[in-house]
Image (tube, grey):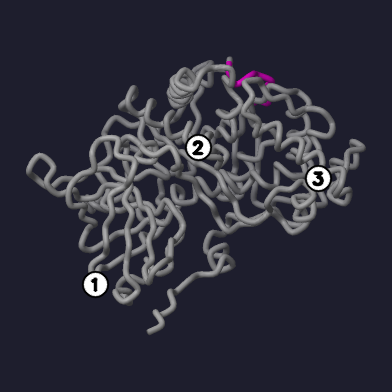
Amino acid sequence: MKPKKRLRLSGRNRAAELAPIRPLEAAFHTLLDDLARARSWPTTKDVARLGAAVAQLSALYNSTEKRSVEASGPDALAARLLFSFPRDVPKSAAALREVVASGRLRLPKDRPLRVLDLGCGLGASTWGLARLLAPVHLQCTWIERDMATLQLASALAERAHEQGVAPGIRMDFAGKNTFDVSTFRPDFGGKTYDVILAGQVLSELDRKLEPEERVAAHAERLAGWMRALAPEGLLVVVEPALRERTRHLHAVRDDLLAAHPEAHVVYPCLHDEPCPALWNEREWCHEDLPIDLPEWLEPVAKAAGLRWQGLGFAPLVLERRAEKPAPAREVRVVSDALDSKGQREAFVCGHVEVADVAGEPGLLARRVRVAQMERDAGPASVAWDALFRFDRLRFDPSLLVKGEAPEGEPMPPRVRLAPGTSVVRVAAGEDVRNVSAGSTPPTSDDH
């Protein structure tokens, strides 16, 4: 008997659901090409030359050599302006979409939102935040070590405002500074920020250090950055979705949380326990959204030998508060759907019930492989039929792992969903930290 077909959502439907995380519009295409043309750089019409510059830039950033990255020559700046900027703008928006929907990032009523963009490059992270929140008024402080890059970022922002390319977005600048992020201290002068952005920054810092030293150094950097957060402020870290760099971010997260109990993860983790992905060297936890590069960049990506489909990145959003959040009963999907032998499987991460721990059931943060047989699928589990990576799911009855895996066990526990199990996708507007406690999202007095 042929198994019934699983319900699937198309990438187009999913992309519509993720709005306003979207590729840059045609107006940006014209703006970026004009900026490049005015500097006698290749434009998106010069596919071969621009593709070669993009390929060279990609190889430079992805190099494992222990040396600093310098990417400020004309061809490198052209590649960053015409390719890296459009690719990176949606990432900070994607990292914050769930946080914003839950009400954790509130726009002040009596002043602009204060934003610090560390290692801002061309300002892509700030632009992503602004597009997510539009209409919005931002007061921006940009830190960038290279003057040529900072001047280009400023020209881009000014031209976009003059031409009305980004309606509803107002950026005022409290500072555009040529500091090296490795020496700059964001609590300089006692200023605080509502949002601190660090897009693809850790990857470029302290590359000469040994891995363990580098993890410790970056954990302390994040702790220092967090001290400059205003009440209810957020630190948004975005790294490439490469295995080595993402696992480094996982390790930095663990070091930070262990040494600084006031630091808590807002996204994507649903717990502050050690990262289960680090138990297995082959695993890493990253987003991969069906949001492609703008159509006008597809030929350039092909010429550079890079993908244009999908948006891959590793996010970490942190907050500073005194109280520890209550354990959430939801889990995060941390893989794509795995279909085989009449069943659908996926890896999930979060607090699950573990039987026979010290003789009593308890909640532990685990990475679990969950399977449902085709014959057991039904209306109650439609969210499992249509799951996507990084969905938040709630199970009824809760996931139960019988017997805890040994400490450091590389293989995750397995759970098979019983017939009739309810699987609900948690709406982005629900505050995952408070669903289990039945409370409302925190107010300004809760931090």
Residue linked to disc 1? 419
**Image quadrant where residue 115 sits:** top right
* Amino acid type assigned to the residue bearing label 2 in the image: Thr
Disc 2 crowd rating (10 Å Cα; few below 14, some 14-19, many 20+) is many
In percent of width and height, residue 107 lies at: 49, 44
Residue type for callout 3: Gly
Q: Quadrant of residue 273?
A: top left
Tag 1 or tag 3, which sits nearer the N-term? 3
Q: At numbered mark 1, what does the secondary structure look like: helix, strand or loop?
A: loop
297 w.r.t. 16: above or below: above
Which disc number belongs to residue 246? 2
Query: Quadrant of residue 419 in the image?
Result: bottom left
Q: Residue at x 62, y 28 (%)?
A: 64
- Can residue 164 be seen here? no
Whether residue 259 is in magenta: the answer is no
Kindly indicate whether the residue at mark 2 contacts the one at mark 3 (C-beta within 8 angstroms): no
Q: Which residues are magenta?
A: 175-182
Q: Position of residue 231 (x, y in %)?
A: 40, 32
Tell me how far mark 3 sits from mark 1, CA to CA. Answer: 52 Å
Q: Secondary structure at mark 3?
A: helix
Choose between 230 and 394: the one closer to the eye: 394
Q: Residues under labels 1 and 2: Cα distance?
A: 36 Å
Residue drawn at point x = 77 percent, y = 36 percent: 56
Location of mark 3 (residue): 51
Q: Amino acid at mark 1?
A: Pro
Q: CA distance from mark 3 to mark 2?
A: 26 Å
Q: Give coordinates of residue 264: x percent, y percent.
A: 35, 34
**N-terminal-most mark, 3 or 2:** 3
Q: Quadrant of the C terminus?
A: top left
